[in-house]
Every structure is written in structure tokens, then in C-alpha cells.
Amino acid sequence: MGFLYETTNFTGWGIWFFVLFALMAFNEFGRSTKWGGIILFLIIPIMLTIFVWPITAAPGNEYGTGNWFNWVKTYSAIAGCLGFMVLRYNPSLTKKKWLLYFPPFILALNIFEASIRDFQCFTYGAWNGEYINNLWVMSGPWNIMNGVAGLLNIITICGWCGIFVSKDKTKDMIWPDMIWPWIIAYDLWNFAYTYNCIADHSFYCGLALLFSCTIPAFFIKKGAWLQHRAQTLALWIMFVMTVPSFADRIAPVPTTHNSIAFFIVSFLSLSANIILAVYQFNKIHKNKLNLLKDEIFVETTAYKKVIKENK
């Protein structure tokens, strides 16, 4: 941990694991019943918007939660959760192909917002690192590298016309073409984004948050990664907007502020997304596929397993 983050103790790791398992538990509550989702992603956000966030996420507050990005990210994540619930509990809507553009749109929007933020951090010119809007930022080529990686990640979103609702009682939104190569490339990009732009918070909003949706996607409900991601992201950012002092005062684990670490993290992100883009477009060209209509990974074991378990 000494390369990416300052060394933390057992208490710090205990808090990290608590955050991880809490996000996973609330994600399960939100997906297991309709009312669980309504409570978490409609009723609670309305109450927080009216009574809490105008105070805890006010513009210019000392924790940096009052900037445009936090507010946009909060409501776009919540909108994604609610939109996915509409599709999940009205499965006939998935037969209307134009409605299936909503999941990739909300996903692409979230990635694009973060990519713009990376580019914005580069324009600050904080080459030696400084506090800007109460968040520590170090500008550098890593911002450009990872911003480009995010744009590549958007381009490689594929197979959304194959989205359907699972046959079991949880009625999950299943996206079978979103298999592990894309998920890993996304995780590397998103971790690099948090490391670049929310550096001293990324121990939680990078590592813990990404594990909280990747673990369920691989071991609990395969094929539902986007649903897991939207719900855990919404849960985390609602918590941060409500308790903005958490990562700075209550349980801080700062990065080492090492420029080499910033470069390596973004280099891995960019490399993974270049490899993914080359691989996917080679498959599209070789099999003469239509990116807007066809699924790419139908012949893979991962795709077939998701179909077998959910249709």
C-alpha cells in the first residue's frame, strides 16, 4: 500500500471492509424487492435533497462536495437506478428496442462526465499538486491519458439490444454482452479517474466502490453488472453528499501524492482500453457485425452461461 496510499492500520482496513460489505448488502436490498429499490433510490433521495444536501453539499463547502460534478453524478446515478427499475418491473418494455438505448446512454453519460473531469483537472495546471475546491489534485499527462481511456470505454459499450429481464423473482436487468473484458477495462479506467480527480478519497470511492459492484457481477448475479454499478454508485455518492467529512476527517487514507503512481495507474487504464477497443473492432469487422444492433460475444462461455441462468 505504500506506493499508492499511505500505510493504514487494522482499523482503517476494518472501515474499508465495512464500507465494501455495506454497499453490497444495500445493493442486495435494493434489487431483491421493488419496495427496497423505491425506498433507497426514490424516497430517501427526495428527503435528502430537501432537508440535508443543501447544507452538507452547499457550494464551496470545506469538503469539496458542493461542486457541479458531485451534484450531476448524484442525480445521474439515481436516474439510472430508477430507469433500470422501470425496465425491470415492466419487462415488456425491453421488447421496445428504442427503450434499450437508455442503459447504454446513462452509462456513457456517467463515463463522459468523469472523462471531462479528468480533462478539467489537467487544465488546472497543478503540476506539483494543490488543493482546488477543497480537493487535492495533481495535474499531469495522466489526466489526458485517462480521459482518452474513458472515451474509448464509451466507444466499446456494446450489445445493449440483447438486454432482458431475468426470469427469477429479483427481476434483474441482464446485459449478457457486457462480459469480463469490458468490466475489467472499465474498473481500471474508473479507478484511475478516482485516483486522478478525487485522489485522497479513492481508497473508498475507487477500490471499495468498484469491488462492491464487481464482486456481485462475478459471483452473485452474473450479467447484471450495470445494475450493480448504478446502485452501489448511487448509494456511495448519497452517503458522501450526506457525510462529506468521512474520507477527510473520520477515516482518511490519503494517496502518496507520487507522480509515478499517477502515471502508472492511468497507463494501465489507457492500455487496457486500447486493447479492448482493438479486440472488439476486430471482431466487429471480422464477423461483419452492426455495432448498433448486434451482440459481439455470443460465442463466449461467459455469454452462454448468463443466458442459460436467466432466460
Image: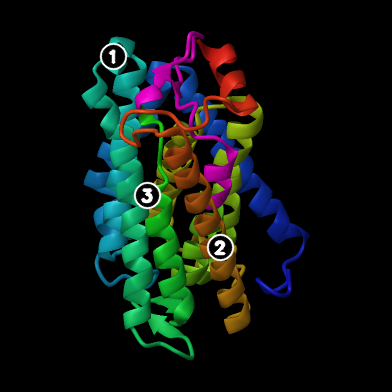
Q: Which of 63 and 268 is in front in this view?
A: 268
Q: Which residue occupies 37% across, 50% down?
A: 154
Give the vertical position of 96 relative to 223 (above or below): above
The residue at which mark 3 appears reads as 155
Q: Nearer the viewer, residue 244 or 200?
A: 200
Question: Could you say which disc has been placed on residue 177 in the image?
Answer: none
Number of residue marks: 3
The residue at which mark 1 appears reads as 95
Q: Which residue occupies 54% across, 16% down?
A: 307
Give the vertical position of 44 relative to 65 (above or below): above
Q: What residue type is labelled 3?
A: Ile
Q: What residue type is labelled 2?
A: Ser
Q: Where is residue 139 in the image (x, y as percent from the top left)?
A: 43, 82
Question: Could you say which disc has been placed on residue 271 in the image?
Answer: 2
Give the vertical position of 62 relative to 244 (above or below): below
Q: Which of 286 and 215 is in front in this view?
A: 286
Q: Which residue occupies 55% across, 39% down?
A: 213
Question: SS at mark 1?
Answer: helix
